[in-house]
């Protein structure tokens, strides 16, 4: 899948508009400052390093995060309809967790986690479009994301911490302690981690289906199926404006 420069720019605007709409002040301003500081890195980042995984192309990360936000809002509607205890979490916590669930993929303050693959054999044979940057010390994606937020003065609630930490559900063995306890006292006190995990799973699965099922059938993927379906059609009206950096515009034009 390849996004055009215009699509990448639109996705970034949409991403900022979620912060503007769902996150309350003064945390909203802190979060916007954080994302604007790293705009040039995040806007072109892939969501994974290997083309068989989801959204391993320029702009794939923000495209994935926008889809996760939308999926989480939809999944939440189903949980609400089926009687989830909504007093245990807020919509701001839901959207904040979705916005930041994969932030640790960014790398650290100064270095990207995913850098362009320079080994042609690995790129051709293994589909590794990117490789891990060894300048970045190892940490799990949730640990790194939470560290980055606190290092920039963005506070998060207990619910948000647990939700970001466990967003991979039981795909990450480290989450067994939250999801496989049989003692009521050791189970999460809110369903938020389950909702965000389901939203993330749904988004990644759909990204796989749109990109790979046509290829497996010998067809060309239809890019129209790939557009994030907005819950709130007016959300783009709240966008904070288009990309201002000349350097970034130049980068996008070269795509
Ligand atoms: Fe994700």
Image (cartoon, rainbow, N blue to C red):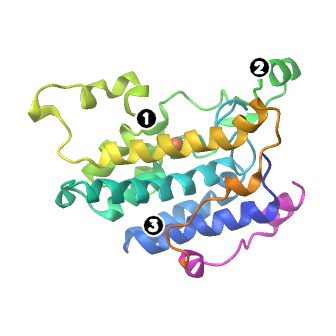
- Disc number at residue 168? 1
Residue under the image location 71 percent in, 35 percent down: 212
Residue under the image location 25 percent in, 47 percent down: 191
Question: Is tag 2's residue or tag 1's residue first in the polypeptide sequence?
Answer: 2
- Mark 3 or mark 2, whichever is nearer to me: 2
Q: Which residue is mark 2?
A: 126
Q: Is residue 214 above or below residue 62?
A: above
Residue 91 visible in the current orientation: yes
Asked which quadrant contains residue 245, the reply is bottom right
Label 3, secondary structure: give it: helix
Counting from the top left corner in percent of width and height, residue 200 is at 48, 44
Residues 5 and 248: in front is 5
Residues 226 and 36: in front is 226
Residue under the image location 80 percent in, 29 percent down: 117
Queried on whether the Cβ of the residue with tag 1 lies below 8 angstroms from ligand 1, the answer reads no
Judge from the rendering whether residue 45 lies leftward or rightward of residue 174; answer left or right.
right
Q: CA distance from mark 1 to mark 3?
A: 26 Å
Q: Is 254 part of what is drawn in magenta?
A: yes
Question: Is tag 3's residue or tag 2's residue first in the polypeptide sequence?
Answer: 3
Give the residues drawn in magenta, as a range.
235-255
Q: Which residue is mark 3?
A: 30
Q: Residues within 10 Å of mark 3 (few under 14, many from 20)?
A: some
Name the image quarter holding the N terminus: top right
Q: Residue at the far bottom: name it.
A: 237
Q: CA distance from mark 2 to mark 1?
A: 24 Å
Asked which quadrant contains residue 242, the reply is bottom right
Counting from the top left corner in percent of width and height, residue 135 is at 65, 30
Residues 130 and 182: in front is 182
Label 1, secondary structure: give it: loop
Q: Is 8 part of what is drawn in magenta?
A: no
Asked which quadrant contains residue 47, the reply is top right
Counting from the top left corner in percent of width and height, residue 111 is at 65, 41
């Amino acid at each position: 899948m390849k996004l055009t420069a215009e699509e990448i720019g639109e996705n970034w605007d949409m991403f900022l508009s979620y912060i503007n709409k769902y996150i309350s002040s003064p945390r909203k301003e802190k979060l916007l400052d954080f994302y604007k500081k790293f705009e040039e890195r995040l806007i072109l980042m892939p969501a994974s390093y290997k083309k068989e995984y989801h959204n391993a192309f320029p702009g794939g990360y923000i495209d994935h995060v926008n889809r996760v936000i939308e999926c989480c809002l939809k999944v939440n509607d189903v949980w609400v309809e089926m009687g989830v205890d909504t007093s245990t979490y807020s919509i701001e916590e839901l959207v904040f967790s979705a916005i930041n669930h994969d932030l640790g993929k960014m790398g650290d303050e100064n270095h990207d986690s995913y850098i362009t693959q320079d080994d042609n054999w690995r790129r051709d044979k293994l589909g590794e479009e990117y490789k891990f940057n060894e300048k970045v010390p190892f940490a799990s994606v949730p640990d790194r994301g939470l560290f980055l937020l606190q290092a920039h003065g963005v506070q998060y609630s207990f619910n948000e911490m647990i939700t970001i930490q466990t967003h991979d559900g039981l795909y990450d063995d480290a989450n067994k302690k939250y999801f496989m306890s049989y003692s009521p006292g050791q189970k999460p006190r809110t369903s938020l981690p389950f909702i965000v995990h389901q939203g993330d799973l749904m988004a990644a699965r759909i990204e796989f289906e749109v990109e790979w099922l046509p290829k497996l059938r010998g067809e060309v993927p239809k890019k129209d199926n790939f557009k994030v379906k907005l819950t709130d059609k007016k959300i783009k009206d709240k966008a904070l404006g288009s990309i201002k950096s000349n350097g970034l515009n130049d980068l996008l034009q070269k795509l």
